[in-house]
Image (cartoon, grey):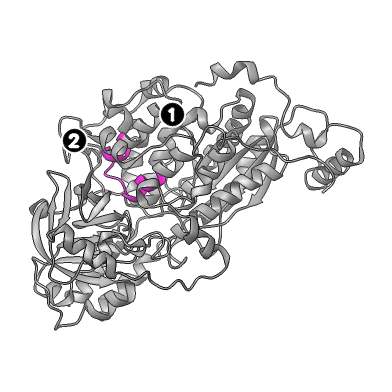
Amino acid sequence: MTAASNSSSRNAPLRSARWFDGDDDVAVEHRAALRSANPEFRPGGSQPVIGIADTSSELNPCNLPLRGLIPDVAQGIHDAGGIPVTLPAMSLGEDLMKPTAMLYRNLLSIEIEEYLRAYPLDGIVLLANCDKTVPGSVMGAVSANFPTMMLIGGPRPIQTFRGRRIGSGTALWRAFDQHRSGELDDAAWAEFEQCLSCGQGACNTMGTAASMAVVVETLGFTLPGTATMPADDPARRAVAHETGRRAVAAVRENVRPRDLITGISLRNAIRALNACGGSTNAILHLIAIARRAGNALSPADVAAAGRGVPVLLDIEPHGQGLVPDFHAAGGVPAILATLGDFIDRSALAGNGEPWSRVLRNAPVVNETTVIRPLDAPLRSDGAFAFLHGNLAPRGAVLKTVAASERLFQHRGPAVVFHGYDDLWSRIDDPDLEVTPESVLVLAGCGPIGGPGMPEWGMIPIPKKLAKAGVRDMVRVSDARMSGTSFGTCVLHVAPEAAIGGPLALVRDGDIIHLDVTRGRLDVEISEAELRRRAAEWVTPPNPYRRGWIALYRAHVTQADEGCDLDFLQPRTPQDIEFVEPTIGRS
């Protein structure tokens, strides 16, 4: 659906009018309350009330650049005839939240949805940047289906270490490997730490934050060409102002999230993600976002949409450049234009126009930019491999563009770790029975087991092998890995070990067979032996008896369904209906 097709609803009364119209005590109280916070509020007018959801926090440097942009967003809303109201929202900081920010993505979505339900809001601007803040806030807005714009905070500045540019996350993993292997001494390691504190903003590699920025811009939630803009770019203030203006226009045009999230736009987003060599985490988030809109997107659908799409973006962790280089080359519009017929340009962009109109002026790429031409890709057939087999009956994923092709066909004995503590208590043991041909297995770290499916899937190379020069091995887990990570890491194995999935049954020495060409992941033991082990398996104890984590573990879905809470995903057309509150005395 396009903005034009909603013309019959453009003159409908504002939702907020239900709070403010009338002469009774309830309406009087409501008008007085809003006027106390915003003296420019005029009752009985046509001023849409637009929320500004502020996820900035001093615990989350990724999102801090957004705080200074709130006045510009508010001014844009005001200049377009709206009433801006800022509201605090949970800040999901990837660095400091433990065990993982993913544990709280769905909680943020609930917060946004209930803000929209409970308050007199006509639309919302979501201020987000860090990995899980973007999908969590979008999921809440999709469930409420209110006119929504998003302002991305952008990547952090680029620092250097001994003459080389530092790519957030990616450089850390490499430096840590060098430190463990003895290549980087303690003094150099301490020097590297100082270089990591390079300023505010999201990771400047094609990690999950940048991947989700690409996704939401492609879906039409941000102004075109803005999601990759560096956090310290002075032009961000103008973007913030225009985002506020556009939020008011979206209310008046009645453009809603479910108008943006269609089969066409989802395919576009999946193809853009592949072309960028994006994060595997974005697959989980796309599935969750789509399902909130009533589209039962699956890993098989993601695989089908991405089939044959070339990887064009040459930036870390799989390439050489960084996100500011991507922005300088034209950002998302340039990658969509370069993809040509892979992109259906009838979908709406974030300025309310179809992508066909936006892309008329997209930059032309050439060999001098980090965006490769269509006929000279980094990889010709997508960024991901989707796997099934007796070890992953409901699927698993491998980021092929960041893996070692020599390991795409591999058989090796399992070395099994059960949880994070077991992993780190043994991985550096010089007596660990492991060879370069071994397959490292980490079980018990999925949505329920983690809990929250932490980014532990890039299992470190055992120290004695790292010292011998081994840089990659096949690794298998029910966890995730950072989008800034790399290596032949099979992730998101479903069902997870904590609920008795086959990964829980693997033992040291079992032969695991990875066949990327055939899309297979198997453990070479008989079905009878698997059944015998399953009968002996005991459910791990649950220490979470109350609170959010208890609720989460009771209702979280598996990776193939996006790790959402089951009661938040509509299963029938009736489930998707948004129930408005009774407007009366509180």
Nearest the eye: 361 or 105: 105
Q: Is 68 one of the magenta-colored residues?
A: no
Name the residue tied to disc 2: 367
* Residue furthest right in the image: 24
Tell me which corner region of the image, top left, top right, bottom left or bottom right, holds residue 41: top right
Q: Residue 262 carries which label?
A: 1
Q: Where is residue 110 in the image (x, y as percent from the top left)?
A: 58, 50
- SS for tag 1? loop
Residue 201, compared with residue 223, is above or below; it is below
Q: Nearer the viewer, residue 430 or 525?
A: 525
Sort mark 1 into few (<14), some (14-19) or many (20+) by Cα contacts within 10 Å.
Answer: some
Q: Could you say whether the residue bearing mark 2 is in a helix, strand or loop?
A: loop
- Residue numbers of the magenta segment: 271-285
Q: Residue at x 39, y 46 (%)?
A: 561
Does 275 appear in magenta? yes
The correct choice, above or below, for 97 with respect to 516 in the image is below
